[in-house]
Image (spheres, rainbow, N blue to C red):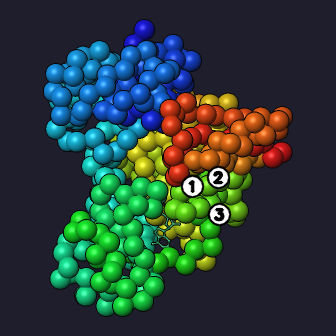
């Protein structure tokens, strides 16, 4: 059978491996960190830094297609891999989503609504940007931010100096604060043949900057639901995308505003594991393997809840809920703010 290479060995890589193996594929994980969660379910694991050219070449040589669960793979590593085997989704989607400035510019040029934003390459740019965008606003590092890391809020313009100091000199963007009523996301897929399938949008609640729950159905009108799906399809088509993509949206009285995109399976799509026939992980494996897509029909109302840090202590009690599916990532060590697993609670 053919082998799917996955860059990154976290929980997303683990669940992609399980889905791939159900379809008869072998998986090979490349992960710099020791003892990755995906390592226990994959057929092969390479533990090496992204700078190890020989390890990368051997990895690429063993794979028929390579995908990723992690966006910040160094460019040089991707070049080496791509010299031997296709990377799906393609490099353009990675390039755009690695950098908030590039990402916001791309989305705006596609005609989608985004928060007002300004480039903050250095301290000197801040004054003009604050005058233009005002407060409340959020300063975000252009690269490497996740789970709310690398962000500083400006409640008033006077917070500018402290916010800049929090960036530690990293290039940033200033974003106007969007007064949204709630947040939703669309998990969308596009196949090799160009067909597009979307899962029902989920409503996301964050706690301490980390996704806490996703609930389907989201509170959206029929028109908003259609809008959300059309926006996701426009992004997929513009990127000639192959695979699953997550699109985070703010719901406002003046329409949907795109917050960010993730060129991979997404935490807010975990509900599909127990709400759909073909979940986001199988959908991604199908797309990158040139298979037709499954449809995204939702068969249940579901709330996904992340199990973070000491939430693991609740597993015995959660196991007594008969219609709650438990998904644990097999991480060696429990740490505060670490995603240890999730549950999908069937509500109806
Ligand atoms: P993720 O873990 O989803 O990748 P992240 O660290 O990349 O998160 P964002 O998604 O940009 O960060 O922001 C985290 C959260 O902060 C958002 O889900 C939203 O609740 C809030 N937020 C971000 N940008 C804005 C904004 N412009 N206006 C209002 N709230 C915002
Ligand atoms: Mg993000
Ligand atoms: Mg986000």
Pick the front one: 26 or 33:
33
What is the spatial separation of the Cα atoms under label 3 and label 1, in whole angstroms?
26 Å
**Residue 323 visible at all:** no
Q: Is residue 45 left or right of residue 341?
A: left
**Residue 39 visible at all:** yes
Q: Are marks 1 and 2 in contact (CB under 8 Å)?
A: yes
Quadrant (top left, top right, bottom left, bottom right) of the C terminus: top right
User: Residue at point 42% right, 55% down?
Assistant: 146
The residue at label 1 has a CB less than 8 Å from ligand 1: yes
- The residue where tag 1 is placed is 211
What is the spatial separation of the Cα atoms under label 1 and label 2, in whole angstroms?
8 Å
Q: Is residue 35 above or below residue 143?
A: above
User: Residue at point 62% right, 31% down?
Assistant: 278
Pick the front one: 340 or 38:
340
Query: Residue 331 location, x and y as percent?
Result: 51, 34
Q: N-terminal of the two: label 3 or label 1?
A: 1
Q: N-terminal of the two: label 2 or label 3?
A: 2
User: Residue at point 31% right, 22% down?
Assistant: 46
Pick the front one: 326 or 302:
326
Q: Secondary structure at mark 3?
A: helix
User: Residue at point 75% right, 36% down?
Assistant: 316
- The residue where tag 2 is placed is 214
Q: Which disc is residue 223 wearing?
A: 3
Query: Residue 91 location, x and y as percent?
Result: 27, 41
């Amino acid at each position: 059978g053919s082998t799917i290479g996955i860059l990154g060995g976290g929980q997303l890589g683990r669940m992609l491996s399980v889905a791939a193996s159900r379809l008869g594929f072998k998986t090979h994980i490349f992960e710099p960190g020791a003892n990755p969660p995906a390592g226990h379910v994959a057929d092969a694991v390479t533990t090496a830094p992204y700078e190890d050219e020989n390890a990368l070449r051997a990895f690429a040589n063993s794979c028929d297609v390579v995908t990723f669960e992690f966006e910040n793979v160094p460019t040089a590593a991707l070049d080496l891999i791509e010299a031997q085997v296709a990377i799906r989704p393609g490099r353009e989607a990675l390039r755009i989503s690695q950098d908030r400035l590039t990402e916001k510019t791309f989305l705006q040029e596609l005609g989608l609504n985004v928060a007002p934003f300004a480039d903050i390459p250095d301290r000197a740019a801040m004054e003009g940007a604050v005058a233009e965008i005002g407060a409340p606003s959020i300063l975000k590092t252009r690269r490497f931010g996740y789970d709310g890391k690398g962000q500083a809020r400006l409640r008033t313009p006077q917070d500018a100096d402290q916010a800049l100091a929090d960036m530690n000199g990293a290039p940033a963007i200033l974003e106007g604060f969007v007064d949204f009523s709630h947040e939703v996301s669309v998990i969308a897929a596009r196949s090799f043949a160009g067909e597009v399938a979307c899962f029902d949008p989920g409503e996301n609640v964050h706690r301490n900057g980390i996704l806490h729950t996703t609930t389907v159905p989201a509170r959206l009108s029929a028109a908003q639901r259609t809008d959300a799906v059309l926006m996701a399809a426009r992004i997929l088509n513009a990127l000639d995308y192959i695979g699953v993509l997550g699109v985070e949206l703010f719901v406002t009285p003046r329409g949907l505003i795109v917050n960010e995109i993730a060129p991979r399976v997404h935490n807010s799509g975990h509900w599909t594991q127990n709400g759909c026939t073909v979940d986001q992980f199988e959908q991604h494996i199908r797309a990158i393997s040139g298979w037709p897509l499954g449809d995204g029909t939702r068969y249940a109302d579901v709330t996904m809840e992340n199990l973070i840090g000491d939430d693991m202590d609740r597993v015995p009690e959660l196991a007594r809920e008969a219609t709650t599916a438990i998904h644990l990532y097999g991480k060696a060590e429990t740490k505060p703010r670490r995603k240890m697993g999730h549950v999908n609670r069937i509500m109806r």
